Amino acid sequence: MKASNNLGNKESGSMNSPISEISQELLSYILDIVRNEFEGDTDEDREKRLKVVTVASHVSSFWRFVVLDHPLWWTELTIFPTWNLAAIDVHLKQSQQCLLDLRISRTIPFYRRLLCYTTPLPPSEKDCLDLLELIFPHLHRCRVLQIDGIFKHGTKALFKYLERLFNTPLPDLDRLTLDVWLDKHRLHFDGGRKLLFTSAPLLRDLRLLGVEMKYISLPSTSLTSLHLSRGSHPAIISYVELAKELEACENLAELAIYNDVLDMLELYPRHPTCRIPSLKTLLLLGNMDMVSELLVTLDAPNLEELVIAPAAGRQDLELYQNMKDGSAVVKPHFPSLRWLTVAPLGPEEFAEVMENASAAFPLIEHLTIANTYLEEFCDAFTSNMFFTKLVDLALTDVDQTFADAILAVGKYRLENRVPLKNLILDSHSFKILSKHPSLLEEPYFKLKEGNLWEARRRTLLNNEVKDLYTGPPF
């Protein structure tokens, strides 16, 4: 649909700025560029993209016409208290029949809490029912769907919508994040074990918070990424039940476990194996006390990348290392593992983490350290030959005080005939250290720019909290 010449001429006559002569196509292109400046996947980035559109719509009637004639700009919608049903309705209608990125939460986003926005009261059951009634006709268009805490408390009337959700055709759903109390749902609705979203054939990325495996079955063919965490309901997942589901997932490439959501003690002292040949990436995040026990049970011969953040040191890897190197040989020793990311819990744990990780995973070629402590980093890597296969070392949030330590590490490895090829720094650190006189010649390695930890962190749950997985500040 094109803006009429009459509308354009009228705007031109009433505005002296050359911007009034801009064509619809060029204006759309410019606004696209501005929106894409906020390319992240956080609530704040999504709100900024929407703000570009809403502000532009108030410039003139012509601009408003262009904005409203671009349904793709209205496909992202984040709903939190206190929500405005009329505004939500308009937003959904403006998206026409385009696929939706829809997120609903009972609480306000983290960044708004940091900005000291007034915290609204939690929505009532009626508020939730009215919202669900409004959005349900549009759910079939969802490409991304996130529901946090809406199905936490309530009567059968509320959980009836959750029952409907499990049976709603979602033909284009790619990612689902669900924080619900399914035991409350089962108080109202009987039924046996069922496949989660039987009519979501393209569901690839599933993130479950507070959901126990006894209530659901995972999509066995389409699922490639699974994230499991505690949510508003502090449920514990039986590892025995989870292992059965994981082994049935033919194409699962990424598994993320958060915050002691697994009950590993039910296995003690046995360590039965869970085989996942398709698994490429394993992420162990947050308050995860039984890292070693989980590693012992996983048989993932094609695992390429492991992330432990934060890493507590010996307790995280000791059992795995002992069984791998001792008489009780661990068969799943991850022969393909080459990428390791660790975030030592604090300076006291730094050397211990490096020592144990190097011993447990000797084939690592690419190491990312998400939080680095100057003295501990220098001491650990200039007095011990950790990771003898190491090619790339990536550091985050370092400044000019690290220059001499970085050079010392490079020199030490070169003298011991296991040199680094690349020293990779995040953009901010690279901007500082690439101009440092002692690093200009790069005698021991190639200095490169790369935001490896930040790129990974942004794929995780609760990625608005930057330091959530790197331990307490020091």
Image: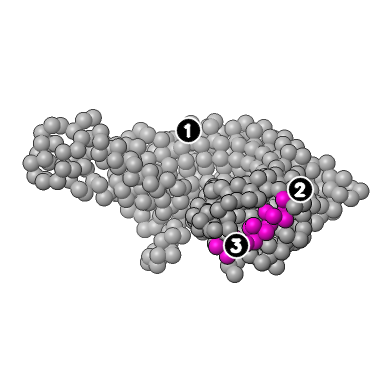
Task: Determine which of the numbered discs, if any, sits on residue 172 in the image.
Answer: 1
2 or 3: mark nearer the eye: 2
Instruction: Please name the amino acid that badge 3 sits on.
Output: Phe
Identify the mark at residue 402; answer none if there is no mark. Answer: 3
Task: Return the residue nearer the eye: 338 or 471.
Answer: 338
Q: Quadrant of residue 316?
A: bottom right
Q: Position of residue 170 (x, y in %)?
A: 48, 34
> What kind of element bears circle 1?
loop
Identity of the residue furthest to the left in this view = 13
Residue 417 — which label? 2
Q: Secondary structure at mark 2?
A: loop
Residue 411 magenta-drawn? Answer: yes
Looking at the rendered structure, the secondary structure element under dot 3 is helix
Q: Whole-percent x and y of residue 258? A: 63, 53
Query: Relative to the observer, which residue lies in front, 461 or 262?
Result: 461
- Residue 241 in view, yes or no: no
**Image: magenta residue range:** 400-414
Q: Work out how far the residue at label 1 is from the one at label 2, CA to CA, in angstroms.
A: 53 Å
Q: Tag 3 or tag 2, which sits nearer the N-term?
A: 3
Is residue 95 placed above or below 417 in the rendered structure? above
Q: Residue 200 bears which disc, if any?
A: none
**Alpha carbon distance from label 3 to label 1:** 48 Å
